[in-house]
Image (tube, rainbow, N blue to C red):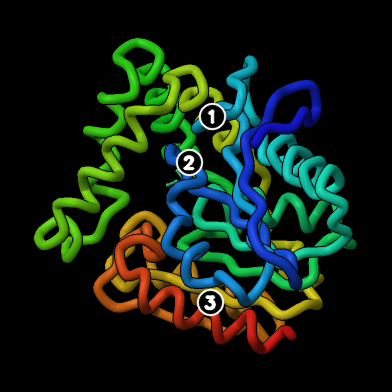
Amino acid sequence: MKTRINGIDIDYRDQGEGLPVVFIHAFPLNQTMWDEQITALRGRCRAITLDLRGFGHSDVPAGPYTMDQMAADVRGLMAALEIDRAVLVGLSMGGYVSLALFRNYPDVMQAMVLADTRASADTHVARERRLGSAEKAERDGASAIADDMIGLLLGRTTLEKRPTVVERIRKMIEANSPQGIAAAQRGMAERRDSTYILAGIDFPTLIVVGDEDTLTPVAEAEALRAGIRGARLEIIDGAGHLSNLEQPEKFNSVLIDFINSLQ
Ligand code: MLT
């Protein structure tokens, strides 16, 4: 389904009833990365996914797409769906957006799941690499970005043993527009350090990380746990950066426990 938010069409899915849980996808993917979670949560809550601007079936306006802009889009979707407060589940870039949502609209947060993400801004080197990757997307297309990223996004267990997951991620990346990929990279390069806001998080927070995640390793998840009062950390064995779709059963089990603890 599509709805007009902040001057663009945003594609979303809204399924089930009860506690609203909003899922925010990683870069450079789309909302279908949450399919296994939506299936597992059927009958337990109201699950909302969206394609962030520039991705999937949402519009691809001019960039850069800052985390604040993406957070405003999520806030706009919640308003359109008449949701005052929700559980936010963000993986990687989705976690950056969740933290921006908390910074800008703290009242909409009921609880949060931060998966395979970090609170810190990019280092100078990481920022330069991102800007180079944005240019590469525009010059060489989404397949070139898939070539660069698949080995980083997926853990060694998935790369060795689960070719269907590898293929699914490649297709998801290649279906995105190079302009959207570039605009999100430039937006992430601009993102602010969110470390200082962690101490203000006063709602239940679950942190999840794959033990084979090399992009946002376990040490980053431990730093998030240390910064957020009462946060719980779950480490998913045999998963890389995309822990939710590399080990969906383990991920779903910790997610369902957390959601049950809220109702
Ligand atoms: C993601 O998975 O969303 C990206 O790896 C985030 C990033 O590039 O920092």
**Please, what is the three-letter code of the amino acid marked with disc 3?**
Leu
In three-dimensional space, the C-alpha distance between marks 1 and 2, rounded to whole angstroms, equals 8 Å
**Please, what is the three-letter code of the amino acid marked with disc 2?**
Asn
Question: Disc 1 on helix, strand or loop?
Answer: loop
Looking at the figure, which quarter contains the N terminus? top right
**Residue drawn at (84%, 43%) of the image:** 80
Q: Is residue 234 above or below residue 191?
A: below
The residue under label 1 is: 57
- 3 or 1: tag closer to the N-terminus: 1
Tell me if label 3 and label 1 are in contact, CB under 8 Å: no
In three-dimensional space, the C-alpha distance between marks 3 and 1, rounded to whole angstroms, equals 26 Å
The residue under label 2 is: 30
Whether residue 73 sits left or right of residue 53 in the image: it is: right
Q: Which mark is residue 182?
A: none
- Residue 57 percent location from the top left of the image: 54, 29
**Please, what is the three-letter code of the amino acid marked with disc 1?**
His
Tell me if label 1 and label 2 are in contact, CB under 8 Å: yes
In this rendering, does residue 190 appear at all?
no
- 3 or 2: tag closer to the N-terminus: 2
In this rendering, does residue 232 appear at all?
yes
- Residue 43 percent location from the top left of the image: 61, 74
From the image, state whether disc 3 or disc 1 is nearer to you. Answer: 1
In three-dimensional space, the C-alpha distance between marks 3 and 2, rounded to whole angstroms, equals 20 Å
Give the camera-side residue of 209 and 41.
41
- 1 or 2: tag closer to the N-terminus: 2
Neighbor class of circle 2 (other Cα within 10 Å; few <14, some 14-19, many 20+) is many
- Residue 241 percent location from the top left of the image: 36, 58
Neighbor class of circle 1 (other Cα within 10 Å; few <14, some 14-19, many 20+) is many
The residue under label 3 is: 255
**Residue drawn at (63%, 42%) of the image:** 12
Q: Residue furthest top?
A: 139
Question: Disc 3 on helix, strand or loop?
Answer: helix
